[in-house]
Image (cartoon, helix red, strand yellow):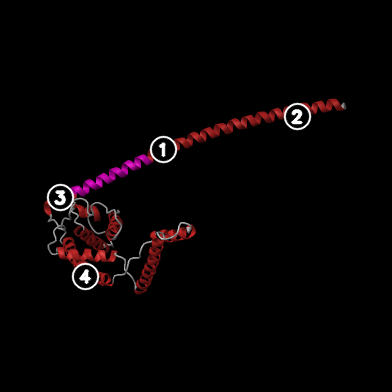
């Protein structure tokens, strides 16, 4: 046993150095292994990502191929049926006359105009009376500008400001009882005309379905080749509105059911947007 304390301390230091060196070597090995594992995992992730990308590309190619095949089958089906089946005529409507269409359009215009309730009409007339009162005051102020003495600068500024404030306002639109009455009549007549036209259109579509006639290309492009299961009545309702839209807005395209989308807001734009959404749902597989 070494009883020399200095020697004993040196031995302990040597042992600690060996232990530290061994620990350092183990840490280096652990770091090397971790780096190798990280590199391996990174490579595996890259390989997996490439495989997924290739799979997605392949799925997209297959989906496009299926879509092309569906279109070819639809075209082939139309050609086969065209040789064996009578065609439905959804473009010629002598029973829906121009006066009837004019009533529908007039009714739509009437619905698009602003209408006044009795209280709104009363409030508007009060606002008009107040506007006219202020107009007289502003005119008097403007006339006074030409007669004020040169030293009346404060009064001149007051009169000028009064005129400028009024000049920036607009007179409210007066409620027209005659227009309101005419619009009420136009709306009623338009509703009746719409009901009459829709009944005629729906009857012809139902007859074409019952006889299994070949639909026009624009009709199938918009609504699909047939009514989806469980949605026959909704499909007929939308199909009727598609035909009515073409009649009201003189759309004659053999491929595009609704033609160019309207830019202005109003009844036509609202109907166009609704039909686009509804028909997309009917065409969904």
Q: CA distance from mark 4 to mark 3?
A: 44 Å
N-terminal label among 3 and 2: 2
Question: Circle 4 sits in a helix, a strand or a loop, which is it?
Answer: helix
* Left or right of residue 40: residue 76: left
Instruction: Give SS at disc 1.
Output: helix
- Tell me, yes or no, whether the two marked residues, 2 and 1, touch with CB atoms within 8 Å: no
Task: Check contact, mark 4 vs mark 1: CB within 8 A.
Answer: no
Disc 1 target residue: 51
Crowdedness of circle 3 by 10 Å Cα count: few (<14), some, many (20+)?
A: few
Near-viewer residue (267 or 195): 267
Residue 43 at what x, y percent from top left?
48, 33
- Residue at 13% x, 58% y is 92
Q: Which residue has dot 4 on it?
A: 189
Indicate yes or no whether the magenta region holds residue 209: no
Question: Which residue is labeled 3 in the image?
Answer: 80
Based on the picture, tell me whether residue 67 belongs to the magenta stretch: yes
Report x, y in % for residue 227: 24, 59
Which residue in the structure is indicated by mark 2? 16
State which quarter of the image contains the N terminus. Answer: top right
Q: Between disc 4 and disc 3, whose residue precedes?
A: 3
The magenta segment is: 56-76
Q: In this picture, is 45 found above or below 82? A: above
Residue at 58% x, 32% y: name it.
33
């Amino acid at each position: 046993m070494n009883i020399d304390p200095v020697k004993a301390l040196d031995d302990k230091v040597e042992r600690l150095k060996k232990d530290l060196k061994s620990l350092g070597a183990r840490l280096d090995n652990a770091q090397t292994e971790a780096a190798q594992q990280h590199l391996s995992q990174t490579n595996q992730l890259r390989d997996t990502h490439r495989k997924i990308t290739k799979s997605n590309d392949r799925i997209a190619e297959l989906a496009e191929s299926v879509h092309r095949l569906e279109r070819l089958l639809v075209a082939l089906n139309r050609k086969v049926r065209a040789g064996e089946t009578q065609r439905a005529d959804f473009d010629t409507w002598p029973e829906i006359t121009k006066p009837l269409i004019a009533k529908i359009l007039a009714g739509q215009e009437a619905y698009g105009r602003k209408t006044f309730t009795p209280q709104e009409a009363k409030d508007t007339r009060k606002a008009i009376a107040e506007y006219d009162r202020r107009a007289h005051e502003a005119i008097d102020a403007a006339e006074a500008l030409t007669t004020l003495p040169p030293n009346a600068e404060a009064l001149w500024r007051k009169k000028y400001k009064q005129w400028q404030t009024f000049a920036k306002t607009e007179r409210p639109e007066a409620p027209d009882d005659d227009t309101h009455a005419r619009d009420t009549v136009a709306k009623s007549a338009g509703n009746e005309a719409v009901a009459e036209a829709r009944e005629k259109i729906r009857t012809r579509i139902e007859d074409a379905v019952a006889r299994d006639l070949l639909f026009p290309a624009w009709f199938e492009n918009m609504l699909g080749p047939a009514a989806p299961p469980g949605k026959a009545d909704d499909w007929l309702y939308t199909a009727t509105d598609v035909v009515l839209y073409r009649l009201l807005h003189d759309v004659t395209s053999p491929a595009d059911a609704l033609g160019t989308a309207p830019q202005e807001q109003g009844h036509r734009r609202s109907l166009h947007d609704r039909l686009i959404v509804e028909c997309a749902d009917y065409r969904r597989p």
